[in-house]
Image (cartoon, rainbow, N blue to C red):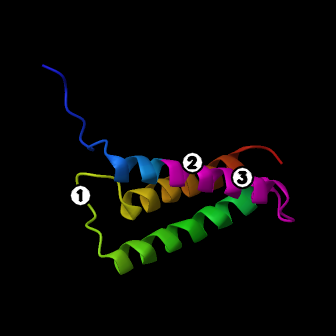
């Protein structure tokens, strides 16, 4: 008997994964040319992405713990990546 994933892999989930991948590529490219440095620019853009995803999820009336990936899940990942970026940039020597 195969295991079931907590998230159903359907068209909407794959759309969210592709959107996340493309947005991360764009954020990394913009951060590479930022005047504040890569880490600070990336952290700021990730925080902005969190806000955009939350507003989008509220406007679309998406449920936070649905069976598929939603903007809420995307916002959570961006928030975690933002926290990780800030933590690593503070620990790493300049």
Q: Which residues are magenta?
A: 18-38
Q: Is residue 14 left or right of residue 23?
A: left
Residue at figure coordinates x 37%, y 80% from the top left: 59
Check whether the beta carbons of the residues at disc 1 and disc 2 lie within 8 A of each other: no
> Closer to the N terminus: mark 1 or mark 2?
2
Is 73 part of what is drawn in magenta?
A: no
Q: Secondary structure at mark 3?
A: helix
Q: Give the number of the disc on residue 76.
A: none
Residue tagged 2: 21
On the image, the x and y values in percent for residue 81 come to 55, 52
Residue tagged 1: 66
Q: Quadrant of the N terminus?
A: top left
Label 2, residues with CA under 10 Å away: few <14, some 14-19, many ≥20: few
Q: Is residue 40 left or right of residue 36?
A: left
Residue mark closest to the camera, 3 vs 2: 2
Q: Magenta segment, principal secondary structure?
A: helix
Residue tagged 3: 28
Residue at figure coordinates x 76%, y 54% from the top left: 29
């Amino acid at each position: 008997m195969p295991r079931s994933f907590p998230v159903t892999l359907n068209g909407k989930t794959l759309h969210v994964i592709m959107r996340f991948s493309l947005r991360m590529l764009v954020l990394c490219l913009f951060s590479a040319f930022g005047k504040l440095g890569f880490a600070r620019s990336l952290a700021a853009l990730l925080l902005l992405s969190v806000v955009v995803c939350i507003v989008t999820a509220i406007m679309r009336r998406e449920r936070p713990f649905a069976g598929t990936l939603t903007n809420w899940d995307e916002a959570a990942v961006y928030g975690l990546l933002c926290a990780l970026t800030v933590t690593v940039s503070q620990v790493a020597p300049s």
